Amino acid sequence: MRKIVIAGNWKMNKTVAESVKLAGEVVAAAKDIKQVVVAIAPTYLALAKVAEVLQGSNVKLAAQDVHWENQGAFTGKVSADMLKEIGVDYVIIGHSEQRSYFGETDETVNKKVRKVLSLAMKPIICIGETLAERKEGRLESVLTRQVNGAYAGLSADEALSTVIAYEPVWAIGTGVTASDDEAQEAHAFVRGLLAKLYGDSVAQSISIQYGGSMKPENAAGLLAQKDIDGGLIGGAALKADSFLGIVRPGEGLSK
Ligand code: 13P
């Protein structure tokens, strides 16, 4: 059995006050959610205040990134123990925006994943191809490189604490979603990669989220796919009602 995990990645949106307000709305709207794991990822700046709002609720706290070093002269960065102290459960790692704008590589993804796991938090490992890579027939080679890179040196036990987010870059923030079939095909391929690394039973236990213009209108179709176990939501997570419109179709599904 895999968990359905639906996380809102707020990216660089919302002031602290706005984040507190939206977090409160999500908590209220998600009260009756029993099976889907719901998480929200505000900016670093808002994490501590949002953590207070989430106390005693069924909504988990996620961070959008982390640095792999413990502490020191790394201006602008935040360490894993700082996130842990605040009560962060999930850490998004290797988002395509990090990869394309801020020099994230498969190697830095791997370092961050190991650090987060060492403090008993769960990495949400983002992978996905650009439109050019897909058109050139490189989908499988890109996903293979990203998955093998992220999981290098991880034990099966550690792998079981990870979540993958398959986010085709061409679908992020564009309004263009992968079709149910395109997404399912990529997810099945990724699960096959996990099976090669850790065997089928581990691969069957790792949740693989879809991300890229997911919204209430397309959530049910995507979540119904055999290998799609949740979502990583950008734009549609910035309003509680649209975010919950994606979470609700996940209730009652078993994977
Ligand atoms: P959108 O839902 O805005 O396309 O963003 C997806 C995403 O990048 C989530 O991490």
Image (spheres, grey):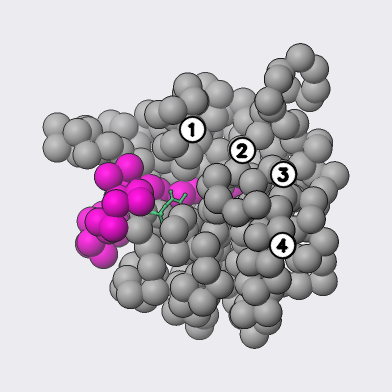
Residue at 48%, 39% in the rendered image: 95
Q: Which residue is mark 1?
A: 98
Q: Is residue 216 above or below residue 199?
A: below
Ligand 1 is within 8 Å of the C-beta of the residue at disc 3: no
Whether tag 3 and tag 1 are in contact, CB under 8 A, the answer is no
Q: CA distance from mark 2 to mark 4?
A: 20 Å
**Left or right side of 90 for 49:** right
Q: Does 50 appear in magenta? A: no
Of circles 4 and 1, the one toward us is 4
Q: Amino acid at mark 2?
A: Asp
Crowdedness of circle 3 by 10 Å Cα count: few (<14), some, many (20+)?
few
Q: Which residues are magenta?
A: 160-187
* Sequence-wise first label, 4 or 1: 4
Crowdedness of circle 2 by 10 Å Cα count: few (<14), some, many (20+)?
many
SS under mark 1: helix
Residue at the top extreme of this rendering: 73
Q: Position of residue 82 (x, y in %)?
A: 81, 37
Of circles 2 and 3, the one toward us is 3
Rendered-image quadrant of the N terminus: bottom right
**Left or right side of 156 for 243:** left
Q: Amino acid at mark 3?
A: Leu
| The disc label shown at residue 20, or none | 4
Name the quadrant containing residue 29. Answer: bottom right
| The disc label shown at residue 116, or none | none
SS under mark 4: helix
Out of 143 and 87, give the one closest to the viewer: 87
SS under mark 2: loop
